[in-house]
């Protein structure tokens, strides 16, 4: 039985097709639908147990990756919050050349969440899959998470295709004594 499940999963991966979603392209798992917006892409499976969101707000907006902790912190600002009394269930990351890829699995309120993040050059793409915590053991949930893992692993960032964004207005800092115009 386990062998048949693996064969089915491999067939699903082989049926995946690369789709372009503006600044990102990925291999879409069969049965998944994508709803792109200006700053976010919503992804849902036919089984509708959970869903995934991708934020495009940090495409061409951040410095290149310096540390996992910094990139994860930026990504977490977009995702559902971690329950304060519960540590993450799973926390991994890896570097491939200058590309950082990470994932954190945790509980947020009554939801089971897997936060993914890809940080490459000046783009950081936070993504998260979420479903109700009581559905976590469901076979469909397991398949959705596997599909998300595969889709995230296939992501290519194409920063040149990001929609033009207005840069935030820079706040003028108050001068520090002894520093500024006319200082040695």
Image (spheres, grey):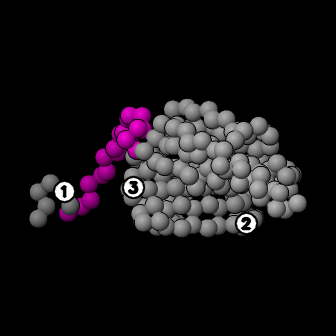
Q: Is residue 108 above or below residue 44?
A: below
Callout 2: few (<14), some (14-19), or many (20+) C-alpha neighbours within 10 Å? few
Tell which circle, 2 or 3, labels the residue nearer the N-terminal end: 2
Image quadrant in which you'd find residue 102: bottom right
> Relative to the observer, which residue lies in front, 62 or 176?
62
**Magenta span:** 159-178
Judged from the image, the secondary structure of the residue bearing numbered disc 2 is loop
Judged from the image, the secondary structure of the residue bearing numbered disc 1 is loop
Tell which circle, 3 or 1, labels the residue nearer the N-terminal end: 3
Locate the N terminus and report the quarter of the image it occupies. Answer: bottom right
* Residue linked to disc 1: 180
* Residue linked to disc 3: 121
User: Residue sitting at 57 percent across and 33 percent down?
Assistant: 36
3D distance between C-alphas at marks 3 and 1: 32 Å
3D distance between C-alphas at marks 2 and 3: 29 Å
The overriding secondary structure of the stretch rendered in magenta is: loop
User: Residue sitting at 71 percent across and 54 percent down?
Assistant: 10
> Relative to the observer, which residue lies in front, 158 or 128?
158
Q: Position of residue 60 (x, y in %)?
A: 39, 46
Q: Is residue 64 above or below residue 57?
A: below
Locate the C terminus and report the quarter of the image it occupies. Answer: bottom left
> Is 177 part of what is drawn in magenta?
yes
Tell which circle, 1 or 2, labels the residue nearer the N-terminal end: 2
* Residue linked to disc 2: 89
3D distance between C-alphas at marks 1 and 2: 49 Å
Q: Is residue 39 above or below residue 113?
A: above
User: Residue sitting at 71 percent across and 48 percent down?
Assistant: 12
């Amino acid at each position: 039985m386990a062998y048949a499940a693996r064969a089915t999963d491999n067939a699903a991966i082989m049926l995946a097709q690369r789709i372009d979603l503006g600044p990102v392209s990925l291999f879409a798992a069969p049965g998944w639908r994508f709803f792109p917006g200006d700053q976010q892409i919503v992804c849902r499976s036919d089984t509708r147990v959970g869903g995934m969101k991708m934020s495009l707000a940090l495409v061409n907006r951040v410095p290149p990756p310096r540390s996992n902790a910094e990139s994860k912190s930026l990504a977490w600002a977009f995702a559902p919050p971690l329950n304060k009394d519960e540590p993450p269930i799973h926390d991994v990351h890896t570097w491939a050349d200058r590309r950082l890829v990470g994932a954190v699995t945790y509980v947020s309120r009554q939801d089971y969440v897997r936060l993914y993040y890809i940080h490459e050059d000046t783009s950081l793409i936070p993504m998260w899959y979420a479903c109700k915590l009581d559905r976590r053991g469901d076979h469909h949930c397991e398949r959705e998470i596997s599909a998300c893992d595969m889709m995230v692993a296939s992501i290519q960032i194409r920063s040149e295709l990001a929609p033009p964004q207005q840069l935030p207005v820079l706040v003028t800092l108050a001068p520090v004594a002894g520093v500024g115009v006319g200082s040695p």
